[in-house]
Amino acid sequence: MAMSDEARMAGTGAWLQRASQDMRAAAHGLKAVPPLLDDVVFHCQQASEKALLGFLIWNGVPFRETHDIAEIGAQCAEIDSSLAPLIDRAAPLTEYAWKYRYPGGPEEPSVEEAQEALAITHEVAQAIIERLPQEAMER
């Protein structure tokens, strides 16, 4: 069953709003003293994932629940092939959904790794925003 335009706009806007909040949390974590680097990269992964899911919702593409940016991104690239190079660069963010989240694993990423993750996340969000009409971002 096709999603109504109203539901599609609301869904897209909600996912983009959550992506924006995750990007804010990542930026805030980077400014903390000392920086909260594991949280920064986690929120980067989440923001990228949510921005891409918003794009899929806007385009009426069903998706399965996953944190795999490569999988979600491949669906986005089927809609707009110009996203493919960015998806390739963003795909490694996937591991941040779990890599530093639990005891017994690696302690935390480097500052440089966190900064790079945030830069890529901004690129993903910007690329999605550029491909959506203004009304898609309103909630």
Image: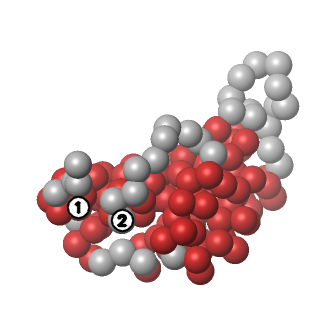
Quarter of the view holding residue 54:
bottom left
| Res 7 visible | yes
- Quarter of the image with the C terminus is bottom left
Residue at the extreme top: 104
Q: Amino acid at mark 2?
A: Asn
Compared with residue 126, is residue 49 higher up or lower down, i.e. above or below?
above
Q: Where is residue 36 shown, x and y percent of the image?
A: 67, 41
Residue wearing tag 2: 59
Residue at left 40%, top 50%?
A: 62
| Figure coloring | secondary structure
| Res 43 visible | no
Pointer 1 or 2: first along the chain: 1
Q: Which mark is residue 87?
A: none
Between residues 90 and 61, which one lies in front from this camera angle?
A: 61
Local SS, label 1 = helix
Q: Where is residue 105 shown, x and y percent of the image?
A: 82, 25
Residue at left 81%, top 58%?
A: 112
> Position of 15 compared to 123: left or right?
left
Residue wearing tag 1: 9
Q: Where is residue 95 shown, x and y percent of the image?
A: 72, 42
Between residues 120 and 114, which one lies in front from this camera angle?
A: 120
Q: Amino acid at mark 1?
A: Met
